[in-house]
Amino acid sequence: MKLTLLGVWGPFPAPGGGCSSYLIEDGQTRILLECGSGALGRLRKMYPGALSLDAIVLSHMHADHTGEIDLFRYMLEFGFGVTPLPVYAPETDRLRYPVFAPTETHDGMTVRIGLLSLHFFEVRHAVKTMAVRITDTAGHSLFYTADTRLFDGLKDAAKGADLLLADACLVDESNPNALRNHMTVRQVEALKNAAGCRRAILTHLFGGNDALPPLFDTACAYAVEGAIYEI
Ligand SMILES: [Zn+2]
Ligand SMILES: [Zn+2]
């Protein structure tokens, strides 16, 4: 499967950047994971005609992950894409439009979307939030932490993933309020090793950071918009 980083910032974008949004593709299967600011313009640049998506997956309903879901609705209402489009999210009140086919996700749920299998795992954030492990038919897997603090169980959920796509919003490790909702850069590096993941991309980078600390682990990298990874 192929991962394209569309938007990598949170909870607001860095100058010129976009918020959480990732495209997952495997053959003809295409899933938009998160729909933050900037997602639609970037997708339309890749696929200028009617966009053929199999589903949108939203980890939670915070604006930096869902900011353009209504723009997506407008695009579908104007005929740019097949409807109703399946949308998976832990809360579906905002998705009740004829162009969407919403499904509420819950801890332990597994769904098959085209060639890909998705397994949801509830994490610890300010609102109900689902991490997801996405596995292709060859057994390659991506584990996306969504927004979460570090907690017992995350390591097991991420175990052995080929690629860990992880919330590394925090550089400063001293703010207890922030630590309740997000992970630090160092926590993500440690999680990658504890879970035995082959490599990690640190994403949901704080949009207000002027500089990010150097990474110790060469199998870890900061997310860069437009980057593509084969998993
Ligand atoms: Zn966020
Ligand atoms: Zn959030």
Image: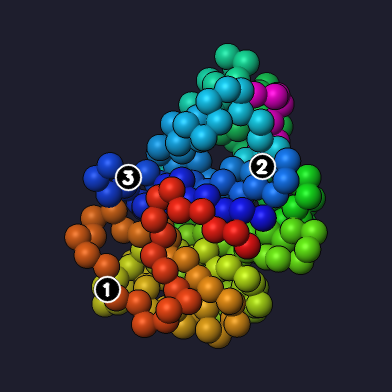
Amino acid type, label 2: Arg
Where is residue 169 shown, x and y percent of the image?
Answer: 36, 63
Closer to us: 134 or 106 = 134
Identity of the residue furthest to the top in this view: 78
Closer to us: 230 or 20 = 230
Identity of the residue furthest to the left in this view: 210
Q: Residue at x 61, y 23 (%)?
A: 50
Q: Which residue is mark 2?
A: 30
Q: Which span is picked out in magenta?
A: 81-87
Task: Identify the disc placed on residue 17.
Answer: 3
Q: Is residue 34 magenta?
A: no
Closer to us: 128 or 206 = 206
Residue 182 seen in the figure: no
Amino acid type, label 3: Gly
Seen in the picture, residue 202 relative to 4 is either above or below; the reply is below
Residue 5 seen in the figure: yes
Q: Which corner quadrant of the image does residue 32 belong to?
A: top right
Q: Which residue is mark 1?
A: 213
Where is residue 204 shown, x and y percent of the image?
Answer: 41, 57
Alpha carbon separation for disc pair 2 and 3 = 23 Å
Alpha carbon separation for disc pair 3 and 1 = 19 Å
Q: Secondary structure at mark 1?
A: loop
Q: Secondary structure at mark 3?
A: loop
- Label 1 environment density (alpha carbons within 10 Å; few <14, some 14–19, many ≥20): few
Amino acid type, label 1: Pro
Q: Secondary structure at mark 2?
A: strand
Where is residue 190 shown, x and y percent of the image?
Answer: 46, 83
Q: Which corner quadrant of the image does residue 181 belong to?
A: bottom left
Name the N-terminal-most of marks 1 and 2. Answer: 2
